[in-house]
Image (cartoon, helix red, strand yellow):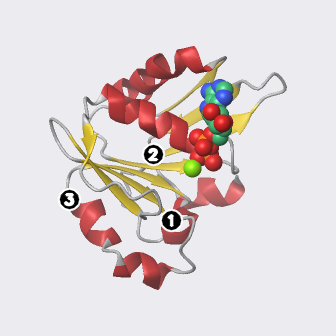
Amino acid sequence: MAFEFIIHNPDELPRAAKTILDGCAGKKVFAFFGEMGSGKTTIIKAMCRELGVHSKAVSPSFAIVNEYSGPAPVFHIDLYRLNNVNEALDVGIEEYLASGNYCFIEWAELIINLLPEETVMVKISVGANNERLVSVETNFSKQILKRG
Ligand SMILES: Nc1ncnc2c1ncn2[C@@H]1O[C@H](COP(=O)(O)OP(=O)(O)O)[C@@H](O)[C@H]1O
Ligand SMILES: [Mg+2]
């Protein structure tokens, strides 16, 4: 299943977060693709709020994995500063992916071969008027990713 929508301005972020979560009911692993500044972190934070998280359990801003507590733990994983898949394995990426908890992953290209088949791909790009074009694909396929 696939769907697309536009975020015209930041006021629409809560609605966008709900759209993604409701449209992907039952899915727990979400991989975000888009260039630096496209809005990956921003929409992940909106999704965390939508899930009712109330605090970061571990909060250094340089952390690779931020765990948010709430009704259920939510893991926000940013692989930008890692160099290779072994470093991702060292931070326990496989345990997070298999935990059954929500995992929102930035720069998931690094671990593309570790992502479960059920991973939702969320692609974000910036439009001419600073709007965000969001495309959500629930049938994860490495082939689709390769084709861009
Ligand atoms: N939907 C949006 N509309 C307008 N500005 C946005 C939107 N999403 C993100 N931004 C802005 O874009 C910048 C980069 O966002 P960020 O989420 O950090 O991007 P990324 O994680 O992809 O590098 C921030 O200044 C943020 O406020
Ligand atoms: Mg980011």
Tell me where residue 73 appears, x and y as whole percent: 20, 46
In-image side of 30 versus 132 (left or right)? left
- Amino acid on which disc 2 is placed: Asn
Pick the residue in front: 40 or 137. Answer: 40
Mark 2, residue position: 139
Q: Which mark is residue 99?
A: 3
Image height of 137 relative to 104, above or below:
above
Q: Residue furthest left?
A: 71
Q: CA distance from mark 1 to mark 3?
A: 18 Å
In-image side of 66 versus 42 (left or right)? left
Mark 1, residue position: 79
Count of number-bearing discs: 3
The residue at 39%/32% (across/down) is 47
The residue at 43%/29% (across/down) is 20
Tell me where residue 23 appears, x and y as whole percent: 39, 26
Q: Does residue 24 show up?
A: no
SS type, badge 3: loop
